[in-house]
Image: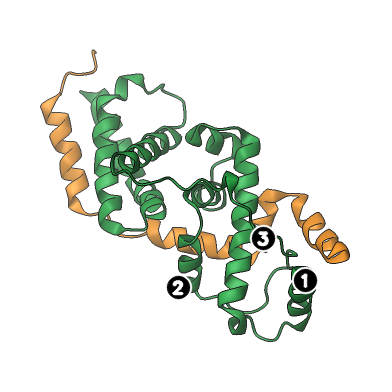
Chain colours: A orange, B green
Amino acid sequence: MKDTTKTGAGTRQAGSADALGANSEIGRKLKQYYDELVSDEVPDRFAQLLAQLEQVEPGRKKD
Amino acid sequence: MSASEGFRTDLLGAIPSLRAFAVSLTQNADRADDLVQETLVKAWDKQDSFQLGTNLKAWLFTILRNEFYSQMRKRGREIQDSDGIMTARLAIHPSQHGQLDLKDFRAALEQLPEDQREAIILIGASGFSYEEAAEICGCAVGTIKSRVSRARTRLQEILQISGDEDFGPDAISAQVTGSSVR
């Protein structure tokens, strides 16, 4: 336990961002998982909702 | 008129990210879209409080996240808080050489406590800095760092345990895991 944790955790902990970077399997999968969600087609209901909101309160922000 | 139109355009542009974050939190597409809808309405109502020049995406993520946790509380759903949970310590392995299935990964992600899941998503996928993520989650930067680190460790554990053969022959890490557990 002593030696393995040292080499493993020690080197990786140096840069946490790097540990999730392109050369880590977890980092790559995480991006792949998320990118797939982001590229999902957005349903029309959201554009409609925003258009409605804008119509209901057109002068909310004072000019 | 033009101000609110610009705001609307900005909100529209943020929807794909908001949906991705919402799905990551809720693990459910329908609930995620309801959450996004609620977020947009709230953001619209509060648009005067948004400070121009600051990060709109971070502001929206904060609203969405608050909405998510307040809905969970209303439902009486207990919020998982990993701070008190002891996570088994295994040696961290060098990056895997085998192929990891996205489906397995999604299942592993689902097993994480919410606070760890959101932290690793914000940092590792949504592109926020630790400072921004801390602001979104209303906690210290160090807390985000430790959640991300625990999430990563946990994912590695889960994926090794549940998907051993997907990684192919990996005698060394098997040995390491075996010896460190004992």
Q: Amino acid at mark 1?
A: Arg
Q: CA distance from mark 2 to mark 1?
A: 30 Å
Q: Position of residue B162 (x, y in %)?
A: 56, 76
Write down the residue under mark 3.
B88
Q: CA distance from mark 3 to mark 1?
A: 12 Å
Disc number at residue B182? Answer: 1
Crowding near the residue tagged with mark 3, few <14, some 14–19, many ≥20 C-alpha atoms within 10 Å: few
Identified at 25% across, 39% down, the residue is B38
Q: For this rendering, which residue is in front, B153 or B130?
A: B153
- Which chain's residue wears label 2? B
On screen, residue B39 versus residue B160, left or right, reads left
Question: Which of the image's four quarters has the C terminus of chain B?
Answer: bottom right
Pick whichever of labels 2 and 3 is earlier in the sequence. Answer: 3
Query: Does the residue at mark 3 contact the one at mark 1 (Cβ under 8 Å)?
Result: no
Callout 2: SS: helix
Give the vertical position of B19 relative to B170 (above or below): above
- Which chain's residue wears label 3? B
Give the vertical position of B84 relative to A23 (above or below): above
Quarter-of-image position of residue B28 = bottom left
On screen, residue A40 versus residue A35, left or right, reads left
Disc number at residue B28? Answer: none
Write down the residue under mark 2.
B103
Callout 3: SS: loop
Q: Residue lying furthest top in this view?
A: A62
Quarter-of-image position of residue A43 = bottom left
